[in-house]
Image (tube, rainbow, N blue to C red):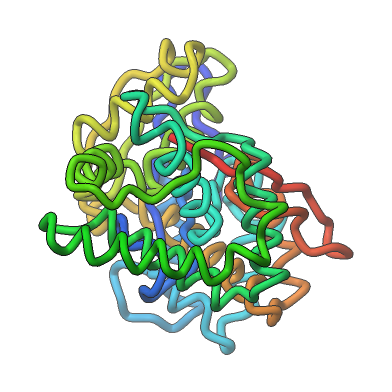
Amino acid sequence: MPSSARVPASTTLEVACDESGSEGEKLVGGSTDTFAHASVAVSTAVAEETIARVRVEARSPATEVKASVVLRPQNRRVLEWLLGDRGPLLGHSHVHLTDKALHLTGRMLWLLRDGARDGMGGGVDGDGDARGLHREAARRVGREAWVSVLAAFNDVVRARSLEEASAGASLLACRLSEVGGQLDRSLPAEGWSVPLDPEGLLRLVARGRGALDPIVPALADTLRHWGSPGRPFRVVHDVQASLTEAAVRAAVTGSGAEASGAFRGLHFVDSHADPRVQLADFLAGAVRRIASQVLAGDADPTLVTLVTPYLSDRSVWLGPWPAGTGATSLPRVAGR
């Protein structure tokens, strides 16, 4: 393998991206409770050699190596090599991690407060209300009861008709009422309400549509990370229907002036055709699986330690990464 995986500084940096755990704007009650967006900046040659080595060591006939292959117990040695300091990714990769329920708590607060009325596309990045509410709700009423509230809100915003939105809003108001007495100190003091009138509901659905998908703030953070040195860069991304032109524009705007000034565009590729994107897919899948285990209280300390250096400090995660494993603080609730 080449001695350095980094792309020569004299060229425009090309960053390959993929995600794991995407279910669009369905954030709770789906197949995954976490979302990870990974980006890698390695040469095509390094990526090809890495995929070839993994295929041999994992005894996989697949031309595209997926995270699920490397995460099998019998391939633990390969996984540790890929993530560790002897592998090709450390120092050349970045992962934005999202706890979907926490992200949805932030979106709900924004939309049920000023977001449904002010006409702005802002978010709740670093919002103490969202973090405090999510923490206290999980502690006082339990994660399951709180997720049922979030699910009701999620259904309202994703409603396909006024009738469906109205039924969902009534259920949301009921569930908030049921848990509200235990959350008085955590709920925002002003401007928090569930609209039940047709006009208010239509406004809420209109503002919320397109505002929930965690891939937009994740991509914004990715652009911010790679654009912060001011070096021109472009992104190659696995085909992702959620990344419409409007979504990419929102991510570029949210990345900040320095990154947006250095950004030279994004184009989509089939992961089968680009081994760099396959590495991003592997990294995103590994981090997402490990993060879900952390939420479930069933994480492997060694793997938690190995993925820690990759995690963005702008990840949507409540509190510190597990203590005693090379912990890093991941305190933010990221908005759009």
At a point 57% along the width and 71% down the height, the residue shown is: 292
Q: Nearer the viewer, residue 50 or 309?
A: 309
Image coordinates for residue 132, horizontal then vertical, percent: 69, 50
Image coordinates for residue 87, horizontal then vertical, percent: 63, 56
Image coordinates for residue 96, horizontal then vertical, percent: 54, 47
At a point 55% along the width and 56% down the height, the residue shown is: 102
Can residue 142 be spotted in the picture?
yes
At a point 52% along the width and 65% down the height, the residue shown is: 288
Which of the image's four quarters has the C terminus? top left
Q: Place residue 25 in its image quadrant.
A: bottom left
At a point 29% along the width and 69% down the height, the residue shown is: 63
Can residue 3 be spotted in the picture?
no
Residue 122 versus residue 323 in the image, above or below: above
Image coordinates for residue 150, horizontal then vertical, percent: 45, 63
Q: Nearer the viewer, residue 194 or 205?
A: 194
Could you tell whether 308 is left or right of 43 in the image? right
Q: Place residue 127 in its image quadrant.
A: top right
Residue 181 versus residue 242 in the image, above or below: below
